[in-house]
Image (cartoon, rainbow, N blue to C red):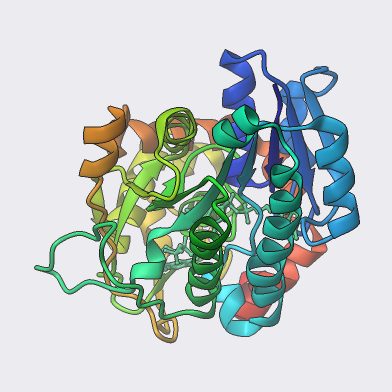
Amino acid sequence: MTLLVTGGAGFIGANFVLDWLSVHDEPIVNLDKLTYAGNLDNLTEVQGDARHVFVHGDMGDRALVRRLLERHRPRAVLNFAAESHVDRSIHGPEDFIQTNVVGTFRLLEEVRAYWSTLPQDERASFRFLHVSTDEVYGTLAPQEPAFAESDPYEPNSPYSASKAASDHLVRAWHHTYGLPTLTTHCSNNYGPYHFPEKLIPLMIVHALQGKPLPVYGDGQQVRDWLYVRDHCRALQRVLAAGRPGQTYNIGGGQEKTNLDVVQTLCALLDELAPAPQRGVVDARTGRPIQRYAELITHVPDRPGHDRRYAIDARKIERELGWRPAETFDTGIRKTVQWYLAHPQWVQRCQSGAYRDWLARQYGASMA
Ligand code: NAD
Ligand code: TYD
């Protein structure tokens, strides 16, 4: 028995691999293209572990995927691989179409070819688990009910449109060819190994460096926050007991405005790593700061910015018995502690390419 995971050197995929191998003996073949978001440092815990086979490659490389399927004969494929950052999709949507749409299509085709050759019992138990996002449902007004699995798709960004397209392909491969697929829609994940271009890690890393904390627009946009290891456990439940052809929403039940999140992070850093003790100075003025919240800076809003996401996770709770173990308060404390304990991981992420991205998105002073 083996799992094939795509994108397992990224944030959620790596957490899934580490969590899986901490409780299962079943090996994982991890196919990852190592884009800017893929990082082998995320997998050092399983370096040398015979249960983890890392393959550097593209899920859209059909010959490679075919070889891997034939050689390792997985009982399931979990598709984490994607271009995942909304802001990057606004600057350059093409990679999102190529990876999220074309890449998923090619992966599906190779998996279908492999699956169709399996003996009857293995065909029946095989699973293709596609990791999608709540962003395919669009945006919510403040009083609207949370997203349910039956809600229509209304993607608003190039990123969410490309994820929506890939979900439709997965759905069609189930309905037309009978491939036993499962699709999950999770809310905003946070936790260890999160690349510091996304809200939470960016704010932690910038605060410790005395850089501005860029809040888009009024900061009143709402996201539901899901601790990444809770998400990984939900995926294990879906893989084990989800019904083929079904979709499952996964959420933390923790809605927060962005400004609340940033203020919480600043307060935690004040407690765990006080700026005066670390000698943090405001990078813009060179003056020492007393509290990290002094760095909060409102910047122009993201074009087409979705106002609110919220997840109705009653289906996975009812059918599969999954609930998140962490609240935002417990998960965010663990997350800040992890970043404080791993300065070298952070340092190695901050390559020239990362600084180029900061300059492009926020202006030269932020890089
Ligand atoms: P990430 O950007 O951190 O990692 C993506 C990984 O995929 C990287 O390791 C990258 O190298 C790899 N990759 C990209 N293109 C590839 C290709 N063509 N072939 C093989 N590997 C490739 O993303 P993440 O945050 O870990 O997200 C994982 C999945 O979860 C994505 O599908 C994303 O859409 C979805 N998701 C993420 C969140 C979140 O909060 N992070 C929320 C909802 C859904
Ligand atoms: P992000 O982490 O990019 O996730 P997503 O856009 O997929 O929800 O952003 C989370 C929220 O934080 C989103 O409303 C945009 C906002 N945000 C900022 O205000 N400033 C930033 O620098 C970033 C990266 C995000």
Q: In the displayed structure, does residue 65 sit left or right of residue 93?
A: right
Image quadrant where residue 100 sits: bottom right
Q: Nearer the viewer, residue 168 or 116?
A: 116
Residue 237, above or below 205? above
- Disc tally is 0
In the image, what residue occupies the spot 81% across and 24% down?
47
In the image, what residue occupies the spot 55% across and 39% down?
278
**Residue 133 horizontal/vertical position (percent):** 44, 58
Q: In the displayed structure, does residue 350 sit left or right of residue 163?
A: right
Q: In the displayed structure, does residue 289 sit left or right of residue 151?
A: right
Q: In the displayed structure, does residue 39 sit left or right of residue 303?
A: right
Q: Nearer the viewer, residue 205 or 223?
A: 223
Residue 26, above or below 310? above
**Taking the image as four quarters, which one is ligand 1 found in?**
bottom right
Q: Nearer the viewer, residue 187 or 67?
A: 67
Residue 290 in view here: no
If the image is split into quadrants, where does the C terminus sit?
bottom right
**Residue 355 horizontal/vertical position (percent):** 72, 66
In the image, what residue occupies the spot 89% across and 44% down?
67
From this viewpoint, which residue is outermost toward the left?
143
Image quadrant where residue 102 sits: bottom right
Residue 306 in view here: yes
**Residue 70 horizontal/vertical position (percent):** 85, 38
Residue 128, above or below 84? above
Image quadrant where residue 334 sits: top left
In the image, what residue occupies the spot 66% across and 80% down?
360
**Residue 175 horizontal/vertical position (percent):** 48, 60
